[in-house]
Image: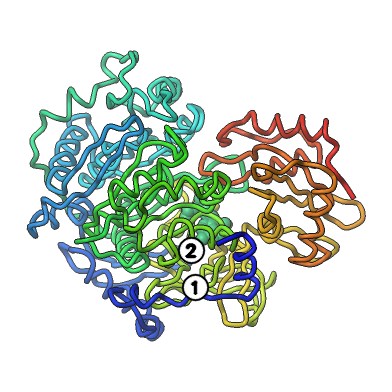
């Protein structure tokens, strides 16, 4: 399909009902499940908890809601590791593959449920031998190796909470997270592979531990093989203490509200928030969403979530959801462009992946690289595609659907957050008619609404602030050590409602369209315009590969739109093209959305999770002193853009 055909398809407002072949085998095809949940949301979740999980003791109360503090399945007991491993093995499914692991250098491992259970038990015993007890916190700082989920499950088995820190974070970020959680043990590796280079994890861990008084031991996996210093009495090798442990380790029943993990995420202040997730409600909703949003058939599907376990997407949809459901997952260690830009598609072909879950930023990168890379591979095993992490522009959605999904796979756009723990707004692929760029509807059992700035529900069609109107099982239970911040950030803005921080609108059929963070919404001459909408309009132009838009202070209009644009190969930046792009945005959204400045660039500053750091771009556009760049994937990108901005004098109207 040519770009022109995609434009025509979007212009005519084409929608995508579930394909007949997909419906034939889908777990959910009708709307009854929504009606059932609407009648009694708590009862609905209780049925899911009972159906999907093994409990060693029943709960006496489904939900205790003392706003803003929720407890789900109160009195119930279960063990997460038991639910992810033991029960599958006990049911005779020990030979099923849990992970098809592919290392970046090309080494591979196939790990069955029985093998994973043995390894988790050994690791759990090793943790106990290192002094870890129920209720302790354990920090984990590793690359995408199988020992990462093993370490998480070993913690869950003995009732210690893990706090995974993404392996791309700096030693300072690691130190702050260890100290906030007062972790006893750090689990790391000598290094991790990234684009053929060693990321020196142990070196960063050593720097962090030098200022982390709570750490008693450091358990170190050998992955990359270079020499690393080991501090006597503190550091131990994984291969010296784990393999010789017995494979028997009790999976002690935990209270449903036992802390399962902390995961730190950025807020509006410099101090990251330790988001708290607990046991029973969390596992219920991740298992439910993983099963039904991905229409999982665990006997036949090969599922691949291409996120990093260091983010919530990896926690919920590489580790806990798939394992609770007995799925077979691909886990890949490295980057999509190593050794070449077709690595993802060679993995899909090799393992016959049937469900692929990735992020819009990755999809737009694949678009930039062009369709020849996927075309080189047989992708016919794919039957369902998913996206998460940011609004997906309709062009990227259609490109994904066409070039990766071969025009036969539904695309589920899943909205959720670190704080929500699991997917909240998303299609059910056998039941929902899709619209490219819309996350469609709240899942059964989830209450979502759009409110104006004083908290009144905005009628359909209309836009405003996205809120969640009732507690949900996998909701955050708080911010570690800071209940007031929890109350203020999420529950202080609109009475009795959870404020997600996202803008959204509903169209005349009630479909939800996510518009990005509220702080990324611009106000131009009193008109609210989302950065995302303008970006989407720019990317809609055939010359544009990627775009980031910021609202910068303007004496006349309040804010003015500044656009940073990466061109596709074969296009040259000049004033003529800048004018053409402005006209294009005017045409797509309206003259009020016409960017005032356009800067052509080759890169954009992104966090390590791939989100564009608009705050930094705003600083560049307004020539302020640069803010904190420690979460940037490549801090030099901003300096480069700034230099170009000053040299180029961006085309301005
Ligand atoms: O702005 C929304 C965006 O990502 C934010 C949550 O980020 P994080 O906690 O890092 O979790 C990302 C993975 C769940 C949200 O507030 N976001 C996430 N998914 C979508 C999205 N925006 C639009 N559409 C989505 N599908």
Q: Secondary structure at mark 2?
A: strand
Whether ligand 1 has any atom under 8 Å from the Cβ at mark 2 is answered as yes
* In this rendering, position of residue 22 left or right of residue 69: left
Q: Quadrant of the N terminus?
A: bottom right
User: For this rendering, which residue is in front, 297 or 349?
Assistant: 349
Residue 434 is labelled as: 1
Residue 276, x across and y down, in percent? 41, 51
Above or below residue 43? Residue 82 is above
Q: Position of 9 compared to 627: left or right?
A: left
In the picture, the disc for residue 413 is: 2
Q: Quadrant of residue 240?
A: top left
Residue at left offset 30%, top offset 77%: 24
Q: How many residues crowd around disc 2 within 10 Å: few (fewer than 14), some, or many (20 or more)?
A: many
Rendered image quadrant of residue 196: top left
Q: Are marks 2 and 1 in contact (CB under 8 Å)?
A: yes
Helix, strand or loop at label 1? It is loop
């Amino acid at each position: 399909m040519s770009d022109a055909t995609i434009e025509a398809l979007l212009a005519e407002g084409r929608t995508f009902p579930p394909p007949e072949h997909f419906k034939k085998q889908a777990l959910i095809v009708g709307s009854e499940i929504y009606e059932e949940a609407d009648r009694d949301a708590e009862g609905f979740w209780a049925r899911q908890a009972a159906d999907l999980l093994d409990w060693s003791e029943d709960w006496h109360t489904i939900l205790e809601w003392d706003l803003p503090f929720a407890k789900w399945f109160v009195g119930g007991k279960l063990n997460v590791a038991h639910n992810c491993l033991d029960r599958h093995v006990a049911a005779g499914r020990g030979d099923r593959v849990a992970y098809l692991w592919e290392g970046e250098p090309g080494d591979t491992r196939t790990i069955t449920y029985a093998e994973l259970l043995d390894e988790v038990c050994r690791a759990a015993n090793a943790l106990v031998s290192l002094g870890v007890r129920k209720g302790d916190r354990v920090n984990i700082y590793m690359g995408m190796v199988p020992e990462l989920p093993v370490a998480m499950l070993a913690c869950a088995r003995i009732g210690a909470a893990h706090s995974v820190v993404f392996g791309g974070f700096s030693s300072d970020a690691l130190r702050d997270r260890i100290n906030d959680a007062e972790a006893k043990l750090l689990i790391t590796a000598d290094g991790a592979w990234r684009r053929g280079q060693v990321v020196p994890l142990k070196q960063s861990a050593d720097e962090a531990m030098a200022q982390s008084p709570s750490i008693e031991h450091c358990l170190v996996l050998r992955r990359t093989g270079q020499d690393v210093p080991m501090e006597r009495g503190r550091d131990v090798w994984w291969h010296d203490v784990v393999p010789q442990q017995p494979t028997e380790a009790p999976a002690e029943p935990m209270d449903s509200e036992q802390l399962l993990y902390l995961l730190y995420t950025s807020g509006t202040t410099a101090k990251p928030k330790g988001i708290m997730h607990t046991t029973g409600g969390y596992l219920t909703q991740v298992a439910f969403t993983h099963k039904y949003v991905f229409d999982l058939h665990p006997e036949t599907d090969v599922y691949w979530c291409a996120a990093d376990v260091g983010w919530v997407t990896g926690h919920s949809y590489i580790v806990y959801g798939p394992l609770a459901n007995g799925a077979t997952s691909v886990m890949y260690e490295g980057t999509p462009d190593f050794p070449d830009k077709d690595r993802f598609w060679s993995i899909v072909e090799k393992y016959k992946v049937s469900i692929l879950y990735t992020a819009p930023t990755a999809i737009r990168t694949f678009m930039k690289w062009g369709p020849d890379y996927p075309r080189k591979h047989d992708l016919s095993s794919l039957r369902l595609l998913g996206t998460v992490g940011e609004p997906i522009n309709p062009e990227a959605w259609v490109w994904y659907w066409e070039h990766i999904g071969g025009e036969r796979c539904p695309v589920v756009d899943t909205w959720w957050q670190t704080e929500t723990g699991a997917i909240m707004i998303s299609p059910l692929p056998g039941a929902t008619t899709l619209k490219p760029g819309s996350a469609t509807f709240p899942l059964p059992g989830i209450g979502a609404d759009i409110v104006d700035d004083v908290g009144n529900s905005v009628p359909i069609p209309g836009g405003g602030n996205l809120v969640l109107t009732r507690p949900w099982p996998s909701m955050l239970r708080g911010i570690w050590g800071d209940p007031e911040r929890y109350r203020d950030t999420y529950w202080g803005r609109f009475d009795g409602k959870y404020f997600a921080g996202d803008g959204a609108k509903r169209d005349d059929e009630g479909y939800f369209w996510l518009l990005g963070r509220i702080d990324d919404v611009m106000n131009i001459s009193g008109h609210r315009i989302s950065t995302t909408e303008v970006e989407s309009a720019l990317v809609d132009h055939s010359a544009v590969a990627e775009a980031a838009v910021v609202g910068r202070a303007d004496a006349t209009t309040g804010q003015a739109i500044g656009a940073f644009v990466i061109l596709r190969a074969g296009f040259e930046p000049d004033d003529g093209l800048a004018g053409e792009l402005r006209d294009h945005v005017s045409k797509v959204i309206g003259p009020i959305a016409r960017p005032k400045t356009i800067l052509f660039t080759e890169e954009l500053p992104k966090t390590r999770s791939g989100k564009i750091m608009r705050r930094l771009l705003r600083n560049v556009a307004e020539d302020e002193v640069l803010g904190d760049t420690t979460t940037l994937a490549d801090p030099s990108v901003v300096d480069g853009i700034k230099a170009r901005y000053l040299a180029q004098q961006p085309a301005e109207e």
